[in-house]
Image (cartoon, grey):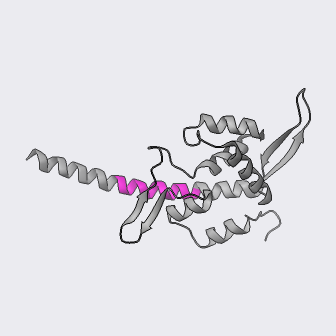
Amino acid sequence: MRAREHQLPRRARSRIAEGVDNLLEFSYYMCGTYMCKPSDEEAGPVWCGRAAGRMPGFFQPWLLLFLAERPAHGYELLERLRKNDDTCGVDPGALYRTLRQFERDAMVRSSWNTTGGGPARRVYEIAPPGVEYLDRWAEHIRGTRERLGRVLEAYERRSVRNADVQRR
């Protein structure tokens, strides 16, 4: 490892090294839930029934993105997550468990802020391995966006052909 290179947590390194390109596996790995839960190989994935338009599994990258913008305490992060359409239903317990796990994985650091009139607050900031992890997320999302774009293009071509056939 070069002197300025930061290493991702072992769990993240091993999955990235395997070249995770399956969105189901990646979403399960990243957040512990499938966007779609596979039923069996023949039938294919089954939608898990979450709210339409919301993509589960994006809680972690949003959290790291907020910390990349500026250090923040837990309550501020919770408020920002709740204002975001993709993470509005976040549970406070899940937030703090994730922050603690990020600390154990050296992706974030925390310190106590004792300035001000109120009680001391733990302030979190992203660490270099967290930035690297966020970069990996961005790479994956770009690839997924390209794959989804190809599916939508094929679907739209099919829809146009079907509309032409129906007009005849």
**What residue is shown at x 22% (from left), y 48% (from top)?**
160
Which residue is outermost to the left?
A: 168
Q: Position of residue 125 (x, y in %)?
A: 79, 46
Q: Position of residue 73 (x, y in %)?
A: 78, 39
Which is more toward the observer, 104 or 128? 104
Quarter of the picture holding the N terminus: bottom right
Q: Position of residue 40 (x, y in %)?
A: 41, 70
Magenta residues, dominant SS class: helix
**What residue is shown at x 54% (from left), y 50% (from top)?**
56
**What residue is shown at x 56% (from left), y 62% (from top)?**
26
Which is more toward the observer, 73 or 164? 73
Which is more toward the observer, 147 or 1? 147
Q: Decide: is 22 above or below 165.
A: below
Q: Quadrant of residue 67?
A: top right
Q: Position of residue 108 (x, y in %)?
A: 78, 52
Q: Is residue 110 magenta?
A: no
In the picture provided, is 35 more to the left or to the right than 42?
right
**What residue is shown at x 60% (from left), y 63% (from top)?**
29
In the picture provided, is 83 more to the left or to the right than 70?
left
Q: Is residue 149 magenta?
A: yes
Please provide the residue range marked out in magenta.
139-152
